[in-house]
Amino acid sequence: MDRNPLLANQEQILSESPSSLLNYLYTAHFLARWGARMWEFSVGLYMISVWPDSLLLAAIYGVVESASAAVFGPIIGRWVDRLTYVKVLQLWLVTQNLSFIIAGGSVMALLVFSSLKFTNLVAFISLVILTNISGAVGVLSTLAGTLLIEREWVVVISEGYPPDLLTQMNSIIRRIDLTSKLVAPVITGFIISFVSLKASAMALALWTAISVWVEYWLFMSVYNGVPALGEGNLRRTSKVSPSDVEENISASQERSNSLSNDGSESSAAAGKNSASKIIEWVSKVSYIDAWRVYLQQDVVLSGVALALLYFTVLSFGTLMTAALEWEGIPAFVIGIARGISASIGIAATVVYPMLQSRILTLRTGLWSIWVQWIWLLVCVASIWVKNSHLSAYMLMGGVAASRLGLWMFDLSVIQQMQDVVPEPDRCVVGGVQNSLQSTLDMMAYVMGIIISNPKDFWKLNLMSFWAVTMAAFLYTYHLYGIRKHLFHFEKLSSLVQCFVR
């Protein structure tokens, strides 16, 4: 019997992709993430330097960034879903890199003309606003790229192949992101420490201006080399939006009714028509429609559980770092702990494929979230330790160790969304998911503003732990609703019998 030519072609592509096209994809993703991580690390230092002895500008930027992602995330998801792959790719790379170039330029102006806040307050405020807006636009464009690559291209490329390929690609993509998060701050920190802040801002602008061309060439090489992406692009351009069809039908019916009804009937029905039009218009607003699509998914509970993990100060972010410094922990020790934490996160991307291949995606998520919860018990226990330095080291150790469970759970939920969410809704759901995560991240910053005394950090510690606890129970409930059981007790009993014998 002759083999299916299409299947033979797919097998040929699979054998070629890991050695060439997938490497192009990973390299381009690394270049894009490196620039974003450089800016993410540097912006806080820039703001503190511009306004010394105050976290005000850094806090304002954090709120602006999180709020923009929370508000516009669903809209970005809908936008990515409606445009072609090439158009999204072009807009993403141009917008992200241009935004970081503008942000780097405005920061350089603030650093060079440091007396502006005294001599020309209007110009100073304008540059700060420009930095915040360009940074927020850069983050939103980065979100568009994340949705395109992590939620769309990875899935399309792996279609028709064994599930292990999707798992492997997800793990490598996350490993690249975590590696950039670990190494980019180190390189940027060396530039700041041994050269200057101005040099780091210039380096960021130059990196983005040069790397964008390489990124585009690599991504387009992948797009042109993988037929599945071209086919997926054709499906996008040929599909008709149901909402557009309904809108046309509704408009036709309204015109017909207006011609057939007499003046008295039209007057009597005017109120009802106005109310129905408002309801119909609201339901078609991109933001509302995106949330409606998200809430209809089978993985909504998994997504909410993942988002709850963002309502936390138990990470090596601004708030926990400030609290550790207040406790007298040296900066280099915090840096080492942060590096260990990132290394454990990278290890999670190696462990996840091995665990997922044995107990599948759903149960991997269950074990992962509870592993994170167990390690965070160390952070809670640190509250009652009298020795402040020992307490701080317990806090750092618990947070670092919990990254193993955190990033495996993150990979598990992402793969569930890739497997379960229909193709037309994939980017929309991803946009809403990111919006929800950004909202809870912003709420954590707000709680940090309300509970701003470092002595009261234990309250934020407990609140973060309870958020993780809620996430663990919510995901457990989700898993039980699907599988109707949590453990294979018959296997446990047989295992016990083996030991007894």
Image (cartoon, rainbow, N blue to C red):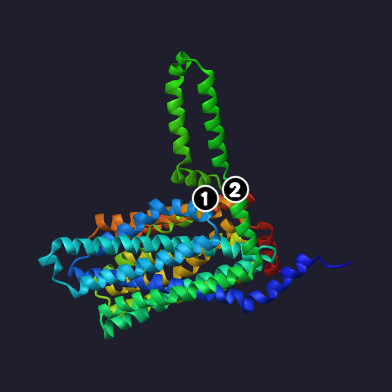
Q: For this view, does 148 lie left or right of residue 400?
A: right
Residue type beneath disc 2? Gly
Give the labeled residue for mark 1. 301
Q: Position of residue 113 (x, y in %)?
A: 17, 73
Q: Is residue 257 above or below residue 20?
A: above
Q: Position of residue 429 (x, y in %)?
A: 51, 52
**Distance between mark 1 and mark 2 Cα atoms:** 11 Å
Q: Position of residue 433 (x, y in %)?
A: 47, 54
Q: Secondary structure at mark 1?
A: helix
Q: Secondary structure at mark 2?
A: helix
Residue type beneath disc 1? Leu
Q: Position of residue 332 (x, y in %)?
A: 31, 80
Give the labeled residue for mark 2. 481
Q: Is residue 473 visible?
A: no
Name which of mark 1 and mark 2 comes first in the sequence. 1
* Tally of numbered discs: 2
Q: Nearer the viewer, residue 241 or 322?
A: 241
Q: Residue at x 42, y 56 (%)?
A: 437
The quarter of the picture where residue 267 lies is top left
